C-alpha cells in the first residue's frame, strides 16, 4: 500500500479500519486498541508500522509498551485497561466491516467495492484506474 500511496499522492484517499479477528488472533484486539490509543497522540501510523513490522507479530503488553516508548508516547496510552476509551472505535470499525462484506484480513475496498483482485501494487493501480461501478438501487 505504501508504494500505491506514494505513486498516487493526493489522488488517493486511503482509510484504515480495524477488523481484529480475536478468535484467530487473541492479541489482535489489544493491537487495534493500542493503535487507536496512539492515534490520540497523533501517532497512529507510527504504531501501525510497529505492529505490522516483521514476519511474526509481537503484540503482547510488553511489546506494545516498547513500541510506545520507541515512537515517543507514554506507554499507558496504549496499554489495557487505559485503552478502554477507544474500544468503541475498534468495535465500530469491525461492525462496519461485517456489514460491508469483510470476512478476513487484509481486505481492501477500491472505489467503494470490495477488491477481489490481486493484492499487489499492480493489482491496486489497475483497479483504481477502472471506472467505478455504480451501486445497484
Image: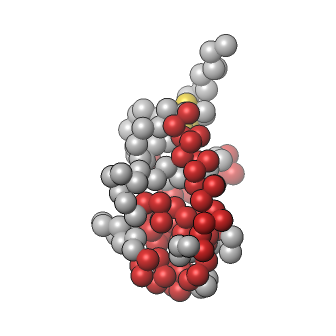
For residue 80, above or below residue 27: below
Residue reaching furthest to the top: 137
Q: Determine whether 136 is above or below 124 in the image.
A: above
Q: Which sits in the foreground, 124 or 103?
A: 103
Given residues 53 and 67, the one toward you in this image is 67
- Residue 51 falls in image quadrant: bottom left
Toward which corner of the image does residue 35 lie, by quadrant? bottom right
Q: 129 and 67: which one is in front?
A: 67
The quadrant the C terminus occupies is top right
Q: Which residue is located at x 60 percent, y 34 percent?
A: 111
- Specify how the rendered protein is coloured: secondary structure
The answer to whether one can see residue 63 in this image is yes
Residue 126 visible, this orientation? no
Q: Which quadrant of the view contains residue 95? A: top right
Left or right: residue 134 compared with residue 106: right
Q: Position of residue 91 (x, y in %)?
A: 57, 50
Is 11 on the left or on the right of 114, as rendered?
right
Q: Could you tell me residue 50's position as x and y percent?
A: 46, 72
The spot of residue 31 in percent (x, y) is: 47, 65
Task: Name the residue: 56% across, 33% down.
Answer: 99
Amino acid at each position: 500500500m505504501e508504494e500505491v500511496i506514494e505513486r498516487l499522492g493526493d489522488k488517493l484517499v486511503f482509510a484504515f479500519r480495524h477488523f481484529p479477528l480475536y478468535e484467530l488472533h487473541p492479541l489482535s484486539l489489544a493491537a487495534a486498541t493500542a493503535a487507536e490509543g496512539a492515534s490520540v497522540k497523533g501517532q497512529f501510523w507510527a504504531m501501525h508500522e510497529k505492529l505490522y513490522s516483521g514476519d511474526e507479530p509481537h503484540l503482547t503488553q510488553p511489546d506494545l509498551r516498547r513500541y510506545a516508548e520507541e515512537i515517543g508516547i507514554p506507554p499507558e496510552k496504549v496499554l489495557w485497561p487505559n485503552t478502554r476509551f477507544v474500544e468503541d472505535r475498534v468495535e465500530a470499525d469491525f461492525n462496519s466491516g461485517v456489514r460491508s462484506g469483510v470476512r478476513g484480513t487484509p481486505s481492501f475496498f477500491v472505489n467503494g467495492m470490495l477488491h477481489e483482485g490481486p493484492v499487489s501494487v499492480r493489482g491496486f493501480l489497475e483497479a483504481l484506474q477502472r471506472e467505478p461501478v455504480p451501486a445497484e438501487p
